[in-house]
Image (cartoon, rainbow, N blue to C red):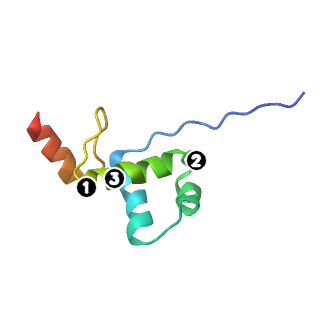
Amino acid sequence: MAIKTRKISRNFTLAQKLEYVKLMIEEHYSNRQVLELSGAGPTSVPRWKKQYLAGQRGEVTEGKTPLDSDKRRIQELGK
């Protein structure tokens, strides 16, 4: 019988997520490169990028905190 191991869950701060997203957008890193750098799960990195780009377009996702500090501040002031 094979021994199954689970990947240890990591929590990333909003600043860390923003840093990785900027690597993808500004430095043209691939999802795979950011996955290897960060150690995040395979669905996390594309989700962060999608969330960031949606925030840049002005779309607000219910229950999600924007990655960009300016967008977070605007959302807080709106409340």
Q: Are marks 3 and 1 in contact (CB under 8 Å)?
A: no
Lower sequence index among marks 1 and 2: 2
Q: What element carries label 1?
A: loop
Q: Which of 55 and 33 is in front in this view?
A: 55
Q: What type is the residue that disc 1 sits on?
A: Arg
Residue 52's mark?
3
Q: Do the residues labelled 1 and 2 touch (CB within 8 Å)?
A: no
Task: Give residue 56's position: percent from left, percent from top.
Answer: 26, 56
Q: What type is the residue that disc 2 sits on?
A: Pro
Q: Nearer the viewer, residue 49 or 11?
A: 49
Question: Is the C terminus in the top left, top right, bottom left or bottom right quadrant?
Answer: top left
Q: Is mark 3 on a helix, strand or loop?
A: helix
Question: Is the N terminus in the top left, top right, bottom left or bottom right quadrant?
Answer: top right
Along the horizontal axis of the image, is 2 left or right of 57? right
Q: Badge 3: few (under 14), some or many (20 or more) residues near its Cα, within 10 Å?
A: many
Q: What type is the residue that disc 3 sits on?
A: Tyr
Q: Please give the name of the residue rendered at 55% of the width and 36% of the height, measured from the top-left corner.
A: 9
Residue 42's mark?
2
Along the horizontal axis of the image, is 33 left or right of 48? right
Cα gap from disc 1 to disc 2, whole angstroms: 24 Å
Along the horizontal axis of the image, is 16 left or right of 65? right
Residue at the extreme right of the image, as rendered: 1
Quick check: 18 above or below 14?
Answer: below
Read off the residue under disc 1. 57
User: Which is closer to the viewer, label 3 or label 1?
Assistant: 1
Lower sequence index among marks 3 and 2: 2
Along the horizontal axis of the image, is 44 left or right of 52? right
Task: Give residue 23's position: percent from left, percent from top.
Answer: 42, 65
